[in-house]
Amino acid sequence: MTTTDSTRLNPADIPVVILCGGMGTRLREASEKLPKPLVDIGGKPILWHIMKTYEAHGFRRFILCLGYKSELIKRHFLEMREQVNDFTLHLGSQQPPVFHDETLEENWEVTFAETGLETGTGGRIRRIRKYLGDAPTFALTYGDGIGDVNLTAQLQQHLESGRTATVTGVHPTSRFGEVHVDEAAKQVVELNEKPTLATGWVSGGFFLFQREFADRYLDDEPSLLLEQAPLQQVARDGQLGIFAHEGFWAGMDTFRDWTDLNKRWDNGEAAWKVWKD
């Protein structure tokens, strides 16, 4: 694919694969009854926040790789119209509900793919290849990470690079509080609960891949992990680019993360909210 051809790609035609099958064992307080992608931030599932982020950059095709409590994710989307719209239901007849003045804003195409309860992240991607269609490029992210990533700029960088894959690099967050001290006064002047380290990069998800990645670097082993052999090999081949993201990013791994993200939303400090109401 030439650069000229690639620049004509419309984000609306690029499938966005979201890994939604994990059990979220470290977030047990919030996810024991729900799959992690349905755990809410400000009353909406984190999965919705992720999809709205992509939508803000023109993406609208989604493929959800399901596993743990998949039926609840399916039910959530099937019931979205009933949750936000007025409707009339003729009991005792076979007529479907009649919806009035529909207000559902999300114009998404969502494919729900059962990829197994214990399948690895790479195995899940391998199992949804048929839903990619003939798209030369696809996006991929996890169902528990959010950020104000400039997905438009990332797509342009990826296509212009000619590489097989691009990962979003983010600065890691320390598990320990950062203390700024006035040593002369032996006094703490500032305490940052979860500081972002200025050096080094970690994967923040939000990948872009050429279709060949799913065919060449993934095999049919169910336990295959994307983060191990596939990404390690594509990196050794010189085909893994990095999109450096200096803005906000957070993974919702623990109950502490969940409460922090909800606090940010409630205080109007949700930096990842890049869409308009």
Image (spheres, rainbow, N blue to C red):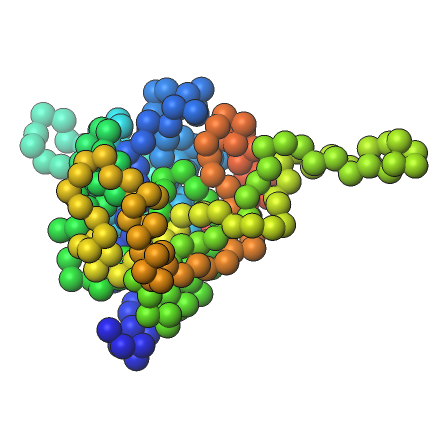
Number of marks present in the image shown? 0
x, y (%) of residue 182? 87, 38
Q: Residue at x 17, y 39 (%)?
A: 221
Q: Is residue 32 left or right of residue 134?
A: right
Q: Nearer the viewer, residue 266 or 116?
A: 116
Q: Residue furthest front?
A: 236
Q: Nearer the viewer, residue 160 or 49?
A: 160
Q: Residue at x 43, y 42 (%)?
A: 145
x, y (%) of residue 60? 30, 55
Q: Is residue 54 visible?
A: no
Q: Is residue 267 left or right of residue 203?
A: right
Q: Quadrant of residue 164?
A: bottom left
Q: Is residue 214 left or right of residue 257?
A: left
Q: Residue at x 70, y 36 (%)?
A: 178
Q: Nearer the viewer, residue 175 or 40?
A: 175
Work out whether 35 lies above or below 268.
above
Q: Is residue 23 visible?
A: yes
Q: Which of the image's four quarters has the N terminus? A: bottom left
Q: Residue furthest left?
A: 94
x, y (%) of residue 168? 44, 54
Work out whether 27 lies above or below 121.
above
Q: Residue at x 24, y 39 (%)?
A: 224
Q: Quadrant of residue 29?
A: top left
x, y (%) of residue 212? 21, 60
